Amino acid sequence: MTSIDVQDLTKEYGRERAVDGLTFTVLPGRVTGFLGPNGAGKSTTMRLVLGLDRPTSGTATVGGHAYATLREPLRHVGALLDAQAPHGSRTARDHLRALAASNRVPERRVDTVLEEVGLASVARRRVRTYSLGMRQRLGVAGALLGDPPVVLLDEPANGLDPEGIIWVRELMRALAREGRTVFVSSHLMNETASYADHLVVLGRGRLLVDTPMRGFIDTRVQPRVRVRTTDDGALRRLFADRGVEAVEGEGGRWTVLHARVEDVGRLMSAAGLPVLELAAEEGTLEQAYLDLTAAETEFTATPSPTQSQEA
């Protein structure tokens, strides 16, 4: 089993502890989202996994081995940390050919991954002419070059257009379905919710959460139900009589707190009230994340006087 194993990992820069005693495992066959506020230690952790920094203490291994000990590492781990890394004077194809040669990857693989990421038609253009989104695609191509069982991506949707975001989302899902270990850092909550199966969340260098995504949301955001009927007065009385906590909104739409669709539906049916709308309002990853990290954010903005007045 090729997993990423982080054990009691700590990294200090002078007096500052960027990563503080982290322990977690990223398993194959699923997409693990890696979240945390700015300065939480996500990039440092990824660099430690990839041997780009040395830990102060603890270990980070891939398939039981430190990255630095891997022969031909691109065949084991593919990573995108910085889309600006490729030299601007090289063509995309030459950049990938150099990576392939250094890891004994067959050159035919270069054209395969260029096709996969949608850059085949511009493969002989110099990288400096590429947009940020094109550089991101090239970075993903480099990560896939060695057909590795483990893939690490840092903000892979950065700079991509809507089509590109959908593409990278489907790519990550496909890699996980193939049984690969997929570890993705992102600050885009809605996007992470669309592809991640599992979450690892950091705050100020410490582990806050290591859990399935749906469970994380459900435990931190109470379920709500949106409902509408033809008789608002009768619905109001029903809720009051039964002690149901509900908030009336515009257009006769009610939001029932701490409830599930089946419970509200049975209640209205028993009262003989017609149902015009009955739907669950699922908690979102953004709501759960903000609830968890409210006290862990290092950099926050103070609302301007205008914003305060508008609120």
Image (tube, rainbow, N blue to C red):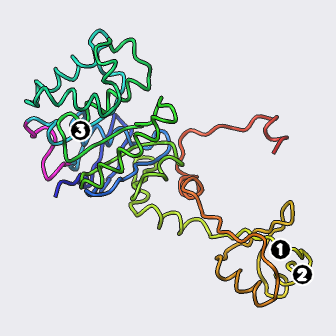
Q: Are marks 2 and 1 in contact (CB under 8 Å)?
A: yes
Residue 47 location in percent, x, y? 29, 37
In the rendered structure, which segment of residues is drawn in magenta? 61-71
Q: CA distance from mark 1 to mark 3?
A: 54 Å
Q: Amino acid at mark 2?
A: Ala
Q: Which residue matches tag 2?
A: 234
Image position of 266 (left or right of 54): right
Image position of 130 (left or right of 307): left
For the image, the number of numbered tags is 3
Q: Amino acid at mark 3?
A: Gly
Image position of 138 (left or right of 250): left
Residue shown at 73%/68% (left/top)? 226
Observer-side mark, 2 or 3, equals: 2
Is 207 in front, or is 158?
Answer: 158
Image quadrant for the C terminus? top right
Q: CA distance from mark 2 to mark 3?
A: 60 Å
